[in-house]
């Protein structure tokens, strides 16, 4: 066996998206020797694709905005299932995190008086999203990347080495976490380029690996989203919550087939775009749910007036939370009122001058022109739901991001709780910054307080290596690409946007079979930059996480946010008080109920009683 | 509306390689990256390629198609004739790792050599005030997705390995310009551009701007204005000539 490459750090951050980079900056600023590991090149993580903006109640455009309003919107969006402490911290700290980005060099779009401009988005009462055109994620990731560089330059000045206290390992995949007893001791993985294995010894590991969307066929997510962090946490003994809640974004591209699922930003609607069916009707007026009736306009005149006068009009129903809009589109298509390629029409061309569309939505304009031959300044787009975001993730302590495993932290999309059953647009980028920073600080504190460092046992390494090499040792087994396609099809069809008990049971049976077949995958070629091998290893994570999703979804017999049951169509206040918790067991997952922590009373007081009655049980209200 | 397309894809590693021929299905609306993925799934499971977003936003999938530097995910198959053989090769300026994947660490090294944003000391977070017109110049450069196609194309390094040491390339000269034009940056970057990043090597051929998938006016809006600022301090014949040839209206 070749000599194993080894590194030792205080804090190991897995993931170089917004959450991972913000966590690494914080850990480093707390004096920790920190490493960031990521599967892609530095600066290419999923965060780069975010379009619309970062939600933060700075009140720059409407001074009535404040953290309490943002908190309320977040809880409503998540149908009150959110971890309220996370929602509170998030609403309170998001403005500081955004302003801090300016000190790192970010250049957001401005208001007339020179402040950061804020735009409207679904579910947010006031214009709240700081943005840069429709490429906000690029600005966020580049800014954090450049901040990392600036910290490295400080180290270079002080020590003559850029990487003295902060180092990025790019195109590196973690396959297993390693432990010493019940504590985290590091991580094991391989260089994608060479296929060589590396052991990282570190007393604290922060998971910031993003989501799971690659288990679904139609998705806005990239190849990286194989749920690695979710699976690593499970296998290390941590628990996941809310895995049944998956956000299907209402507007993904539907044509041509090769781009099906690619996101069309919600800003199109925030800036005036409307949804129409094949009869030319703005159908969203027919889909305003009872709980939102007093906040959304029920006629076109009022909805249109809202864009210029928000104080005296209700919002257009196109800006309802994403779960509502996605279901509405689904129903229209099912009723035979869809567009030629099975979506509905999203039109901004009749709503804004061409020049304005090009200025506000440059990358959408570009994307449709280049990929679909559609000029959005002159024609409507065809759109339909696409798997976009997982609300569920690692169960963490809100203040520090720590999981139930000592030394293991999580932040960003891989963590669970903050968004409840449904995330509002723009609340992810702010989540990354708020909880990335908190996890970085939490991990640093943990390391500082520790007397003795964990040690990695040699057997653990041998085992991790053997697992990773297995696909090369077998001949005549299955092609990982085939298995992946079958998994995606099953999850899409059977645990998708509308769910039924029978279908989910079938999904679970199929998952069992896929798990068996995955035992005998065969990979051609060698270890050097071999995508077939990479996929074979990712499949193990996708299968485990998909099992959590399907099992939790089957258990929750109500509809709420990103979980819609055809056989249990209404929301049930009793279910709001319960979380479904997933743990690893054998080579699969088990799901159990756990009571939700009651909302603190001063936070409850922020809502009208009549509103709380829609969500809480009589017992909770008394 | 499918047809069998003819492809030649470079396969190999740092020890050598060759173009390999493939015949593969092409469907309506597809881009070159879709075809590469179909090759992986059906004929060459270990074919190495980088990609993430598949929507021209991340800058991972850079390569050369029929010799032209382009993003694989934004090159539609419909721009080619059905009978045409399409050749896909890795970026030429960077060392090969495998197949279509190159070692782009040159760019990360150069990125690290550009001194970072120097914030104003007297403003607390939240107190920054800037006008939209003033941020727009730098915002154009911040659209950069770091695909490194401009770096790959610029002849100063494409044909002259030895210049890599002293020349940061269009992407990072543009980064210097971006900071120089940032309304609140407090550092002086003009001499740096010339002395540390090799701005003088650029003879404003605009090849970088031509391949930029973000259509950033690298030469006109970043490099020439930087050269002008340098020229205000030193005499530079190329700027003088450039001003004559490419005077902006
Ligand atoms: C098209 C699109 C548009 C969006 N727009 C918005 C928006 O406007 N506003 C908003 O708030 N949210 C938006 N979102 C959601 C938001 O972008 C994501 O939820 C968020 O960026 C996730 O960030 P993250 O830091 O958690 O993870 P990511 O940015 O996804 O980063 C994950 C990192 O983990 C690494 N990683 C994963 N597994 C491993 C492993 N095994 N080993 C090593 N490294 C690993 C990856 O390489 C990557 O670096 C959008 C999402 C999409 C897809
Ligand atoms: S304009 Fe300058 S930087 Fe751009 S390709 Fe020509 S020489 Fe290179
Ligand atoms: S400037 Fe354009 S070509 Fe150069 S790296 Fe950036 S996006 Fe790519
Ligand atoms: S895959 Fe992101 S630019 Fe092509």
Image (spheres, coloured by chain):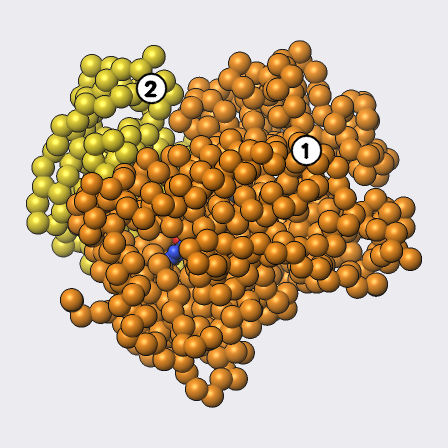
Chain colours: A orange, B yellow
Check the residue under mark 1 and report the chain it is in. A
- Element under label 1? loop
- In this picture, residue A387 sits left or right of residue A557: left
Q: What residue appears at the point 33 percent right and 51 percent down from the top-left corner?
A: A537
- Extreme residue in the bottom direction: A451
Q: Are marks 2 and 1 on the same chain?
A: no
Q: Can residue A592 be seen at all in this image of the molecule?
A: yes
Q: Residues within 10 Å of mark 2 (few under 14, many from 20)?
A: some
How far apart are the two marked residues, 2 and 1, measured between alpha carbons? 38 Å
Q: What residue appears at the point 73 percent right and 49 percent down from the top-left corner?
A: A575
Check the residue under mark 2 and report the chain it is in. B
Reading the image, the residue beneath label 1 is A567
**Position in image of residue A300 (x %, y %):** 78, 22
Q: What residue appears at the point 60 percent right and 29 percent down from the top-left corner?
A: A356
Closer mark to the observer between disc 2 and disc 1: 1
**Position in image of residue A215 (x %, y %):** 45, 41
Q: Quadrant of residue A33?
A: bottom left
- In this picture, residue A455 sits left or right of residue A279: left
Q: Can residue A75 be seen at all in this image of the molecule?
A: no
**Whether label 2 touches label 1, CB < 8 Å:** no
- In this picture, residue B39 sits left or right of residue A200: left
- Name the residue nearer the viewer: A38 or A181: A181
Q: Quadrant of residue B89?
A: top left
Reading the image, the residue beneath label 2 is B27
């Amino acid at each position: 066996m070749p000599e194993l490459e080894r590194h030792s750090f205080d804090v190991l951050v897995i993931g170089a998206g917004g959450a991972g980079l913000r966590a690494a900056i914080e850990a480093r600023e707390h004096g920790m020797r920190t490493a960031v590991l990521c599967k892609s090149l530095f600066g290419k993580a999923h965060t780069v694709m975010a379009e619309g903006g970062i939600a933060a109640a700075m009140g720059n455009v409407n001074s009535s905005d404040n953290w309490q309003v943002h908190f309320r919107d977040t809880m409503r969006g998540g149908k009150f299932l959110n971890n309220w402490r996370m929602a509170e911290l998030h609403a309170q700290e998001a403005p500081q995190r955004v302003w801090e980005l300016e000190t790192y060099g970010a250049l957001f779009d401005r208001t007339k008086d020179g402040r950061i401009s804020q735009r409207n988005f679904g579910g947010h009462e006031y214009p709240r999203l700081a943005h840069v055109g429709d490429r906000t994620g690029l600005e966020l990731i580049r800014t954090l990347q450049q901040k990392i560089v600036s910290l490295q330059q400080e180290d270079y000045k002080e020590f003559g080495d850029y990487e003295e206290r902060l180092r990025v390992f790019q195109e590196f995949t973690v396959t297993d976490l390693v432990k010493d007893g019940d504590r985290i001791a590091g991580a094991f993985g391989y260089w994608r380029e060479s296929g060589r294995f590396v052991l990282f010894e570190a007393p604290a590991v922060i998971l910031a690996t993003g989501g799971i969307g690659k288990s679904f066929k139609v998705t806005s997510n990239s190849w990286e989203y194989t749920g690695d962090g979710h699976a690593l946490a499970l296998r290390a003994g941590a628990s996941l919550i809310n895995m049944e809640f998956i956000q299907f974004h209402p507007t993904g591209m539907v044509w041509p087939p090769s781009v099906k699922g690619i996101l069309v930003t919600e800003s199109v609607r925030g800036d005036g775009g409307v949804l129409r069916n094949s009869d030319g009707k703005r159908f969203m007026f027919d889909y305003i749910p009872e709980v939102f009736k007093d906040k959304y306009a029920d006629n076109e005149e009022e909805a249109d007036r809202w864009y210029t006068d928000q104080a005296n009009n209700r919002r257009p129903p196109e800006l309802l939370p994403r779960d509502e809009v996605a279901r509405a589109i689904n129903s229209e298509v099912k009723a035979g009122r869809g567009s030629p390629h099975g979506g509905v029409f999203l039109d901004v061309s009749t709503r804004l001058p061409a020049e304005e569309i090009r200025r506000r939505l440059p990358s959408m304009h570009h994307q449709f022109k280049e990929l679909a031959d559609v000029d959005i300044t002159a024609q409507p787009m065809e759109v339909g739901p696409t798997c976009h975001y997982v609300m569920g993730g690692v169960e963490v302590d809100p203040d520090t991001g720590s999981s139930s495993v000592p030394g293991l932290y999580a932040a960003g999309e891989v963590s669970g709780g903050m968004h409840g059953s449904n995330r509002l647009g723009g609340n992810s980028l702010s989540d990354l910054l708020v909880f990335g920073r908190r996890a970085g600080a939490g991990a640093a504190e943990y390391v500082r307080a520790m007397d003795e460092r964990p040690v990695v046992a040699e057997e653990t390494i041998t085992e991790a290596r053997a697992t990773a090499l297995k696909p090369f040792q077998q001949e005549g087994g299955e092609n990982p690409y085939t298995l992946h396609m079958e998994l995606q099809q099953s999850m899409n069809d059977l645990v998708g946007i509308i769910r039924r008990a029978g279908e989910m049971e079938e999904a679970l049976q199929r998952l069992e079979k896929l798990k068996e077949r995955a035992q005998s995958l065969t990979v051609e070629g060698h270890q050097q930059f071999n995508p077939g091998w990479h996929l074979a290893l990712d499949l193990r994570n996708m299968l485990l996480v998909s099992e959590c999703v399907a099992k939790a979804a089957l258990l929750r017999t109500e509809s709420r946010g990103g979980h819609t049951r055809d056989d249990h169509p209404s929301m049930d206040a009793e279910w709001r008080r319960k979380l479904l918790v997933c743990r690893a067991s054998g080579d699969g997952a088990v799901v159990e109920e756990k009571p939700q922590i009651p909302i603190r009373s001063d936070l409850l007081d922020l809502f009208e009683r009549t509103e709380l009655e829609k969500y809480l049980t009589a017992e909770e209200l008394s | 509306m499918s047809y069998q397309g003819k492809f030649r894809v470079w396969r190999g590693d740092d020890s050598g390689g060759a173009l390999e021929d493939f015949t593969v299905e092409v469907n309506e609306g597809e881009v070159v990256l879709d075809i590469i993925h179909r090759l992986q799934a059906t004929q060459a499971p270990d074919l190495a390629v980088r990609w993430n977003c598949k929507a021209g936003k991340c800058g991972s999938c850079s390569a050369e198609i029929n010799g032209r530097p382009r993003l694989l995910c934004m090159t539609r198959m419909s721009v080619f004739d059905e009978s045409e053989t399409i050749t896909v090769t890795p970026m030429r300026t960077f060392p090969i790792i495998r197949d279509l994947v190159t070692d782009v660490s040159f760019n990360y090294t150069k990125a690290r050599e550009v001194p970072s944003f120097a914030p104003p000391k007297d403003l607390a977070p939240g107190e920054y005030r800037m006008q939209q017109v003033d941020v727009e110049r730098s915002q154009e450069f911040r659209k950069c997705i770091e695909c490194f196609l401009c770096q790959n194309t610029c002849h100063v390094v494409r044909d002259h390995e030895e210049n890599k040491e002293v020349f940061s390339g269009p992407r990072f000269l543009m980064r210097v310009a971006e900071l120089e034009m940032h309304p609140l940056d407090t550092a002086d970057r003009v001499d740096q551009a010339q002395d540390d990043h090799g701005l003088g090597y650029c003879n404003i051929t605009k090849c970088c701007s031509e391949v930029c998938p973000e259509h950033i006016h690298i030469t006109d809006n970043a490099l020439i204005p930087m050269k002008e600022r340098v020229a205000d301090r030193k005499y530079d014949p190329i700027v003088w000539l450039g001003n004559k040839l490419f005077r902006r209206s």
